[in-house]
Image (cartoon, helix red, strand yellow):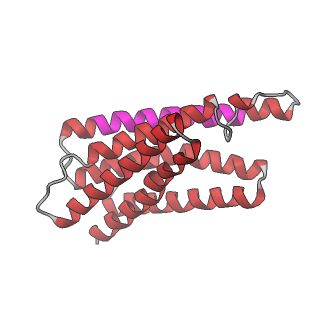
Amino acid sequence: MSMKKKSMAGIITCMLYFLSVGLFLITKSDAALTIWELMTVISGPVVLVVLIRLSEFVSTPATYQKAMVAFMGCACALTATAHIVNITVTRALMQEGVNVPTYFQIGYWPSIEMAVDYLAWGLFVGLSFLCISIPIKYADREKQRMKVISLICSVLCIAGFIGAIFVNENIWYLAPMGYGIGLLILCLRMFKASN
């Protein structure tokens, strides 16, 4: 698949993700929550494909590219686990009337499922972006900009993870700025560069 198609897949996925979040925030319905969670699971592999193409475009050294794939693979596996468990087990038990403690539910902190999701999208996605940004020095200004944006995404993701775990859960919202807004900016730049 060409860089143009991969960047377009990233743009569409980011937009659908933002729409699913908005749908849930407006309706607060179980159906909207399921859509949001499924979009989160789908987003992982799409982000992996986009980051692989981005790392090829900015000539990330092979060792760092392999590390990025490993970190992003961990993120995909962890986020899929957290959200599929929430959809198929936690929420199913709650619908049957079982009083599931909040520490087993997504959307509450502290929570096992949220910790797994924070680990995926904060630490592992942050490390994936970090791998792409190494080394930043580049003669081509566009590639250098993409590496700098990747570094900013990395810092936001990792800061959100560390902040949520050790300081205050609200610091987590730095991470979505990195993997959501930052990724969208990278995809738009990749799309522009492919024309």
The spot of residue 99 in percent (x, y) is 84, 28
Magenta residue span: 67-88
Above or below, comparing residue 16 to residue 67 in the picture: below
- Residue 183 drawn at (x, y percent): 41, 57
Residue 28 occupies quadrant: bottom right
Please give the count of numbered marks on the rendered protein: 0
> Residue 124: x and y, percent?
41, 37
Residue at 18% x, 66% y: name it: 141
Residue 104 position within the rendered picture, expressed as x and y whole percent measured from the top left = 69, 29
Q: Taken as a whole, is the magenta stretch helix, strand or loop?
A: helix
Q: Identify the residue shown where x is 72% and y is 29%.
A: 89
Let me know if residue 76 is in the magenta part: yes
Residue 52 belongs to magenta span: no
Give the residue at x 71% y 55%.
24
Q: Nearer the viewer, residue 127 or 184?
A: 127
Where, by quadrant of the figure, is residue 73 drawn?
top left
Q: Residue at x 78, y 52 (%)?
A: 29
**Farthest residue, direction front:** 167
Residue 135 vs residue 32: left or right?
left
